[in-house]
Amino acid sequence: MASQAGWIGGSPPRVDGMAKIAGTAKYTADLKFDGLHAAVIRSDIPRGRLLGIDFDPSFDWSGVTTLTAKEVPVNQVAEIEKDLPVLADAEIRHCYEAIALLACADEAKLERACKHVKVRVEPLPAVLSIEQALEAKEVILAPDNVMKRYQVKLGDAPKAIEQCELVVKGTYRVHHQEHLYLEPQVLIAWWDDNGVHVTGSIQCPYYVHKALMHGLQLPTEQVEVLQAVTGGAFGGKEDYPSVIAMQIALLSKKAGGKPVRILFDRKQDVESTTKRHPARVEVVSGSDRDGTLRAVHIKVVMDAGAYVTMTPVVLSRGTLHACGAYGWEQVLVEACAVATNTPANGAFRGFGAPQTLFAIERHLDAIAAKLGMDPLELRKRNLLKIGSIMPTGQVLKESVGVEKCVHIAEAESGYARKRKDLGAANAKHGKARGIGASVFLHGAGFTGSGEERLKGVVSVDLLAGGKLRVRSSSTEMGQGTETVFRQIAATGAQVAFEDVEVSVPRTGFVPDSGPTVASRTVMIVGGILELAARELGERVREETKAGGGNFAQAADRLIKREGRVCASRQYAPPAGMTFDDATYTGTAYGAYAWSCDIAEVEVDLDTFEVKILGFWSATDVGKAVHPVLCKGQIEGGSLQALGWALWEEIQWKDGRIVNPRMTTYIVPTALDAPPMSTALVEEPYSNGPGGAKGIGELPMDGGAPAIAAAIEHATGISFQNLPITPERLHDAMLSRGKEVQS
């Protein structure tokens, strides 16, 4: 029997950990490179008509490769839609839009060359906010600037609200957030007799593969995409690498196939890449005087930016999570995304759910205040449970551990006692302390029929000596995929953790398992990986029974007799899981992860700084495949949420970002991280590996409303908008008692 130390439930050392700690991991910028460096000429206005591009004839252009839209055969980047051009042609739709490309082996000459390119544009009136887009005085997307709409309906919520004992209304706003992954965008492209090759910091290799096939009009076998060691992504390398892969592939082709590398500095990365969608969420709710929630009507508007990118799936998830972790008898959610003349917004950890969950959690606090009830008590009375009906009509049948999460977080944080002992009335020595809570959920995997359309595939190869090789397009980008995949495969096949290897994703060699997004890697891809590994392990054990010997000897006999021995599995939806995309009814997600966050803060009433004294999280993960990594995901995602709540703010002026550097865009570091207590609750999901659910995005959803609730308890001021910076807290203090508007 193989050692079980590295199986599901254990915490073996990360397989990529030592190289990253020692600095020997080879990121794309570390790779030996002898080719051309690329630069992008970008727009400096948010909207305009492109009249021409002039290359200064007095400059020595020898050794410099240039490219404009006129030379791009298919000027489209294939994503959800094909509205995004490789290079702007007739129209400028946002600041930082790519207009021309340059490449040169001499980086100093490349920098000089960029200064000798003049872009002639005719400025046009820009649409720079949700309100301007909805007014449609300037139409930048026909007919009304609305890019996408969704609706979820259960009963007749507006009518039911009119009959309720307590009606509460609120408007909540959230802002852009920059991914700020440690490693900026970087890719290399080159051509040879086999076609085009791209390697770099990539989250979804087959997305890039699809974009190159479409844009270069090549068959699948003439496009190869290889993921290099990737230093973080959070969704920011889901769609954007497709854009720059197309750009440098075209540059390389014009340069005779020479390798071309593009490496963003931090300023360019912040300015030109996608962000979290800002949103405005209006909520009207009806409830009984005893705190029973009855009906809710929610209107969501998200700012998509200039192009579609990932907006439809971001808006979809925001719509489906808008009602939170609570049972409402009647629901109406009306959601839309509007186009603006700002850089396109895209996927970001939690994509869509943090925006609407902030709103509903803040709204629950507002209801509790109207009722004179403890906010956590109101939540506990209305939590979803087994048998509850979701707004889409989905009935929850298993793996609902939210009540346990609330009980554990409440007890470990000392919430009840601190709620009485702290608060605005007990401020001392210029310091006010408070405690607040949020309860939330996150659906794992693609929404509704998305996984069925993807039909992700995983393969497991049998190697000499009874070892296994996992082939999948799911990427390692710091979250521990390679380690947990080894655990899942080892458990399924019942072999030692050390006897499993995971291939680096390379299109053409690994099957398309779907993108590394949507908290689907462990639950969806890991689920079929477990089945494939089990199938392969059983084959070898049958050979052992038939021919004797141990597992390794039987494996070698199979390989000698059959040549390549492999087990592959393709995703198939669980029985009874159906979703109607037209009506947005049915089973939106096979399983939800659940969590309760509690934050304790201290507010300095002189400097208006907020210090987080403690942060408690209890999370239903189904089954912790690797408990240490699981807790790390929760703590890292929570800190990212705290940054969004308190410090991180993209500042805009006339469509331009005025703080595109880490000195002015402030993110929390390890020194800002509060003491964290992380409890894992295990309510297994029958279709996850070992019962596991996806939890990578969930931690982003609850930190901000918990912080806002704690600040409200400490100061008596209810913030409905983010971020809660010292300046906003100062202004709110001066206008205490009035509605806070950012």
Image: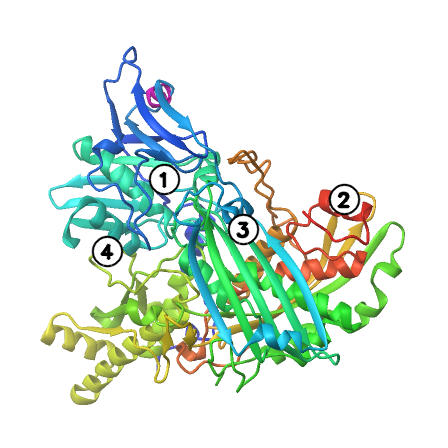
N-terminal label among 1 and 2: 1
Q: Residue at x 23, y 56 (%)?
A: 507
Q: Real-space Cα distance between discs 4 and 1?
A: 22 Å
Q: Quadrant of residue 618?
A: bottom right
Could you say which quadrant of the image residue 66 lies in?
top left
**Residue found 34% across the figure and 70% down from its top:** 451
Q: Is residue 367 above or below residue 401?
A: above
Instruction: Find residue 278 and report its horizontal and vertical position in percent.
Output: 54, 51
Looking at the image, the residue that sits furthest to the bottom is 545
What amino acid type should be assigned to the residue bearing mark 2? Answer: Asp
Left or right of residue 337, residue 253 in this image: left
Q: What is the quadrant of residue 254 in the picture? A: top left
As shown in the figure, which amino acid type bears the numbered disc 1? Asp
Is residue 676 in view from this perspective? no
Q: Give the secondary structure at mark 3.
A: loop
The kind of residue tagged 4 is Thr
Q: Which residue is mark 3?
A: 278
> What is the number of callouts on the image?
4
Foreground mark, 1 or 2? 2
Please tell me whether mark 1 or mark 3 is closer to you in this view. Answer: 3
Give the number of the disc on residue 30: 1
Q: Which mark is nearer the camera, 3 or 4? A: 3
Can you identify the residue that label 2 sits on?
731
Disc 1, SS: helix
Closer to the observer: label 4 or label 1? Answer: 4
Tell me the distance, in whole angstroms, between the alpha carbons under discs 1 and 2: 47 Å
